[in-house]
Amino acid sequence: MIDLTNPEVQRELGTSVQELTGDWSYAQSTMGLADTQRLGEAGHASGAILGFMSLREKHGKGCGDCCLRRSLGRPSTQFR
């Protein structure tokens, strides 16, 4: 799991709070994929990343987790 709430991790990946919480739909409409989508694709393609913990708001008041589906294994048909 990569912690995108950590400013050091953001620096290493060349991303920012603005990019992580900005209007991805505009970026998607002008560039095809938003940078955050490219980050997710790279994480998924690596096969080594379970997911991301990311900021949900520009002011850092919340966070959320995004798990990459391939990393979760085979889906279960039963809930326990």
Image (cartoon, helix red, strand yellow):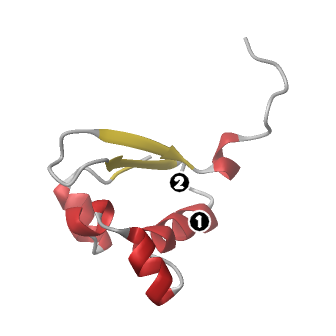
Helix, strand, or loop for circle 1? helix
- For the residues marked 2 and 1, what is the alpha-carbon distance in whole angstroms? 7 Å
Q: Which of 29 and 76 is in front in this view?
A: 29
Q: Is residue 56 above or below residue 45?
A: above
The residue drawn where x is 82% and y is 19% is 78
| Disc number for residue 15 | none
Q: Is residue 54 above or below residue 35?
A: above
Specify whether 77 is left or right of 69.
right
Residue 50 picture location, percent across and down: 54, 47
- The image quadrant that residue 79 belongs to is top right
Amino acid, disc 2: Ile
Specify whether 65 is left or right of 80.
left
Residue 32 picture location, percent across and down: 53, 85
Q: In this view, does 73 lie above or below 14?
A: above
- The image quadrant that residue 12 belongs to is bottom left
The residue drawn where x is 31% and y is 41% is 63
User: Mark 1 = which residue?
Assistant: 46
User: Mark 2 = which residue?
Assistant: 49
Q: How crowded is mark 1: few (under 14 residues within 10 Å), some or many (20 or more)?
A: few
